[in-house]
């Protein structure tokens, strides 16, 4: 993704607010502040397209839709631009009609929706004051507005726990509503929206439904739909939902790093869809572990997790490189309550703590550096991921020569090594290099051998190893209890620790057979769930996971 100057000469990658459309069987992804967009045939391999004409300062939270053989986009950073269009997005000869859509408060985080009858609607807002608004546009007359904007809905954090601001919903600052995206399914309009703030682990998407594109809209009792407060990469808000070429839905969303700047973000992709009763779901369970892609047939689209477990969590790790001794150059808003505090311990044990905001930084950047991890026991390794971080980067724009080069070796005894990945000649920018092995390898030790990276400093937030251990799956958590607090937005979940657990996943939902929401936690049992709706009852369950697999789930508990 692009690097760009923010404040204080801070450089960092960021990708956010994805708008993904299916145009003639090919997928196009439009992303905030990118000087172009991406195209893919399989939702896995994405090619960056630098179009013939585009927004000079990059698009901001762009809207995208398909109408009459063209892709239409609205994403002018000024908030007062025109709809642009092309019938050849591979070339990108975008045309403007010069008809500025001049909403009273500007157009923030727009969404363009083309209904079955060809009518076009604009939804927009990004604010901690104003509601999501909607208006019909005239596609036969330069997409100018028809009538007046309608206020559709706003946040209600006093009732909807997940709409509260801050990490784990623990801030009293006013939350933000933003990023609408409309999906129509079986005659019902599902208007998604993001809340409560893009920089937090609880950034999520909710949905209101209606039988009319401009409402009235009703709050979905199963909200939020897309929620990922735990794991390596957290948050799943301001997204878009698109149907693949096999008829299945996928949800793309915004996820937070928020180290160099509160708006340092990444993109997530999860299986999504609709239950038989119309309930919308996005499955984020084990969402940052390997999943099967759209063209792989699975028995149930909702369940695409490969079953490859995380083998690297907090395993012994060592390096021959001295630790960096430099102050970080970031835009820090933690004192104002708009960011988490910086993690300034850059030690090597940060490289496998499953926290993307922490990272190891090497004082050196040369081809003699190695990192060695001991998995403690022989295990079957199927995939690896190296997540590089932009520590004190001085790269701006999008240079073509950004690259990372390395070699990965494996060993059973720590003495005899075999090359399993050779990226020593890589010429691509792969900041989250995910590599699946053609055949799994049995290994106890994994060694990263550095060759080159364009950044001045070699900084890695996580070296992740996936596969399977050779021992028994963990036991089901016992003594699972749920107590709803006096503040009904919150509930205390407790259970007995499982001795060999890597972590736990809780599930909840409003129907016993549709526990579509989840939260992952490492190490410790117990969880305070702060995402409930005050007048809604729930069903809840918990499971354990470790290197060898996932336990059976506990009995389901019902709370009024």
Image: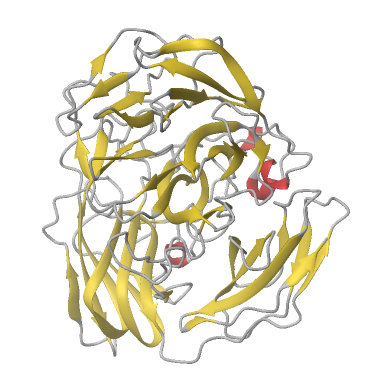
Image point (27%, 45%), residue name: 456
Image point (68%, 33%), residue name: 155
Spot occupied by residue 186 in the image (x, y as percentages of width and height): 50, 45
Whether 130 is drawn above or below 229: the answer is: above
Whether 61 is drawn above or below 82: the answer is: below
Quadrant, the C terminus: bottom right
In this view, the residue in front, 417 or 478, is: 478
Whether 144 is drawn above or below 326: the answer is: above
Image point (56%, 37%), residue name: 193
Quadrant in the rendering for residue 329: top left
Spot occupied by residue 523 in the image (x, y as percentages of width and height): 60, 72
Quadrant, the N terminus: top left
Spot occupied by residue 463 in the image (x, y as percentages of width and height): 37, 65
Left or right of 326, for residue 368 = left
In this view, the residue in front, 23 or 35, is: 23
- Residue farthest along the left direction in this orientation: 425
Image point (16%, 62%), residue name: 423
Please indicate, yes or no, whether residue 176 appears anywhere in the rendered image. yes
Please indicate, yes or no, whether residue 362 appears anywhere in the rendered image. no
Number of on-image labels: 0
In this view, the residue in front, 355 or 32, is: 32
Q: How is the image coloured?
A: secondary structure
Spot occupied by residue 332 in the image (x, y as percentages of width and height): 54, 35
């Amino acid at each position: 993704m692009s690097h760009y100057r923010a404040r204080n000469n801070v450089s960092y990658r960021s990708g956010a607010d994805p708008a993904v459309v299916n145009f003639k069987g090919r997928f196009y992804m439009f992303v905030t502040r990118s000087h172009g967009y991406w195209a893919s045939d399989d939702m896995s391999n994405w090619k960056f397209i630098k179009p013939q004409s585009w927004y000079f300062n990059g698009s901001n939270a762009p809207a995208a839709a398909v109408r009459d053989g063209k892709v239409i986009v609205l994403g002018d950073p000024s908030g007062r631009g025109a709809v642009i269009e092309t019938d050849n997005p591979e070339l990108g000869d975008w045309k403007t009609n010069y008809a500025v859509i001049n909403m009273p408060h500007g157009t923030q985080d727009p969404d363009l929706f083309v209904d079955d009858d060809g009518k076009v609607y604009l939804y927009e807002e990004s604010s901690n004051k104003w509601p999501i608004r909607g208006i019909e546009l005239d596609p036969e007359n330069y997409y100018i507005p028809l009538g007046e904007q309608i206020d559709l809905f706003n946040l209600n954090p006093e009732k909807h726990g997940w709409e509260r601001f801050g990490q784990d919903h623990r801030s009293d600052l006013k939350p933000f509503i933003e990023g609408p995206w409309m999906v129509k399914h079986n005659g019902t309009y599902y208007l998604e929206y993001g809340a409560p703030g893009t920089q937090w682990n609880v950034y999520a998407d909710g949905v209101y439904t209606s039988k009319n594109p401009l409402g009235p809209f009703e709050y979905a009792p199963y909200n939020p739909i897309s929620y990922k407060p735990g794991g390596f990469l957290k948050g799943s808000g301001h997204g878009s939902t698109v149907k693949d070429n096999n008829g299945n839905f996928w949800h793309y969303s915004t996820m937070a790093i928020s180290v160099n700047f509160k708006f340092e973000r990444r993109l997530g992709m999860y299986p999504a869809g609709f239950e038989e009763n119309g309930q919308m779901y996005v499955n984020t369970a084990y969402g940052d572990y390997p999943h099967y892609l759209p063209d792989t047939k699975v028995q149930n689209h909702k369940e695409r997790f490969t079953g490859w477990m995380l083998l690297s969590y907090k395993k012994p790790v060592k390096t021959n490189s001295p630790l960096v001794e430099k102050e970080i150059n970031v835009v820090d808003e933690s004192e104002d309550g708009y960011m988490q505090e910086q993690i300034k311990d850059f030690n090597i044990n940060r490289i496998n703590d499953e926290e993307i905001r922490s990272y190891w930084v090497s004082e050196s950047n040369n081809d003699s550096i190695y990192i060695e991890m001991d998995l403690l026991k022989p295990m079957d390794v199927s995939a690896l991921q190296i997540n590089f971080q932009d520590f004190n980067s001085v790269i701006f724009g999008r240079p073509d020569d950004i690259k990372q080069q390395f070699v990965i070796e494996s060993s059973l005894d720590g003495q005899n090594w075999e090359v399993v990945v050779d990226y020593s000649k890589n010429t691509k920018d792969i900041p989250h290099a995910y590599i699946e092995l053609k055949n799994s390898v049995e290994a106890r030790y994994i060694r990263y051998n550095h060759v080159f990276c364009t950044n001045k400093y070699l900084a890695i937030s996580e070296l992740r190893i996936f596969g399977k251990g050779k021992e028994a799956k963990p036991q089901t958590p016992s003594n699972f209890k749920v107590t709803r607090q006096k503040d009904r937005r919150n509930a205390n979940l407790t259970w007995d620790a499982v001795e060999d657990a890597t972590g736990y996943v809780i599930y909840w939902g409003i129907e016993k057979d549709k526990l579509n929401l989840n939260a992952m936690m490492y190490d410790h049992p117990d969880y305070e769930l702060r995402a409930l709706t005050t007048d809604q009852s729930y069903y809840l369950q918990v499971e354990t996971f470790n290197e060898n697999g996932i336990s059976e789930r506990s009995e389901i508990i019902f709370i009024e």
